[in-house]
Amino acid sequence: MFRSLAVVCFAVLLWMPARAADTDGAMPPFVTSTALTDWLARHPSPLDQAPPHARELFIEALDFGPRGVRSFPYAELAPELTTAELAEVQRLLLAEALPLPGLEIEEAARLRAARAAGALAGPSARVLAAYRDWRRTAEPTEMSGLAIDRLTTEQARAGSDAGEDLRLLHRAALERAEEFRDDARLDTARALHARLHAEGLVTRQDHRSLQRLLLVSGRIDEARTFTAGVPEARLPAVPRFDVSRSPEQGTVRIWRIDGDDGDVPTLRKHPLDLGLRIVVVTSPGCGFSRAAAAAIPSDPILGPIFARHAVWLIAPDAIADVAALRAWNLRNPDAEIGIAVDAAQWPVALDTTPQFLVFRDGQLVAHVSGWRRDGSDRDALNAALAQAGLLHSTSGSAAPANIGDTTSGHR
């Protein structure tokens, strides 16, 4: 999976240990990689289905703490395990399994049969070392990935190897192209994807990753053509973009998703007035954002204020997830999510969720990050609303201020 706005929230959500389930030596929760490796050597698990290099990369990328595993490096396992197997690995390491998509059963069988028959050679030492070094970089930069970039370019030009080198480099090329958004990297990713497809090694998630890359890179027509060319992948429909009433340049703009249930979702560009506005930076993939969306509308203090003044917003890359957002909006009419058109128009990065931005007269006057399910951080949000004049008090007797709806434009 790509590095995305859900990563920060997702990592915190995973800071929950799995329950003990074994009485023979080390057992969950595992606090070191050695403890986990020892346990896996003595017990069958879905990780046995992953090739050795993928299993090693996954374990190397795990973050261990005194209470157990604190992260789940999904990108290393999703290309190797089925959705059900991924859930089993999560249950082994974590207290809660999230619905992460993996291989379909037929895809897993096809790849494992090719590997068993010797038709899918393991990765070369050169490619595996470059891939491992790139993955170990905490904050990827263009310079830190030069080695993997060279190899992806070589692989795209060579057109020979059809083994695990191709699969690893295809994965890296997609991620590097999304991180840095230049045409050369995107074209390399497309070339490697075409080769993977021709060799019969491509998966539905591979197709989805390329579709996503084309969408977030602004290649909408190419994404539409690509999607039509792989009907077997059952990819989400590429949305229609209605800019018939496009706001003036310089106006803060968001995409609103039509609430109909047609086969192809429609996005309409709207201006957003920040005269007196709460902007909730959110993501359906973030557990804390979901908790906020469930609690705030029914809260006797926050509910009326948010109903009048709040907009729920997600980062521009969600343009690749419109179908899922439309489904969310239909289920959560009091927390409908719009998509930012231009991240540069916002005073904070939109890749951490949830965040509460409070504006008055177009200026950011307060900024609160996070939402605890137990409500213990509610005072910080109340204080932010009081600073904007939306609450009379930040004490336990806080009440909405008697302010008319001073915003204009689309909610």
Image (cartoon, helix red, strand yellow):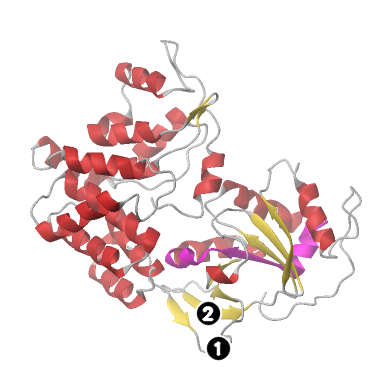
Sort mark 2 into few (<14), some (14-19) or many (20+) by Cα contacts within 10 Å: some
Q: Is residue 312 magenta?
A: yes
Q: Residue at x 52, y 37 (%)?
A: 14
The residue that label 2 is drawn on is 268
Magenta highlight range = 299-320
Q: Residue at x 51, y 63 (%)?
A: 325
Q: Amino acid at mark 1?
A: Arg
Residue 203 makes an appearance in the image: no
Question: Image height check: is 193 above or below 260?
Answer: above
Residue that appears at 68% across and 48% down = 371
x then y, percent, for residue 121:
12, 40
Q: Are marks 1 and 2 in contact (CB under 8 Å)?
A: yes
Quarter of the image for the C terminus: give it.
Answer: bottom right
Decide which of tag 1 and tag 2 comes sooner along the chain: 1
Q: Is residue 118 magenta?
A: no
The image quarter containing residue 393 is bottom right
Q: Which mark is residue 245?
A: 1
The percent position of residue 297, horizontal first and vertical second, equals 72, 58
Against 236, is 288 above or below? above
Q: Tell me where residue 302 sits by quadrant.
A: bottom right
Q: Choose between 177 and 2: the one closer to the eye.
A: 177
Q: Is residue 227 visible?
A: yes
- Comparing 325 with 319, the one in front is 319
Q: Is residue 84 or residue 392 the one in the foreground? A: 392
Under circle 1, the secondary element is: loop
Say whether residue 134 is left or right of residue 170: right
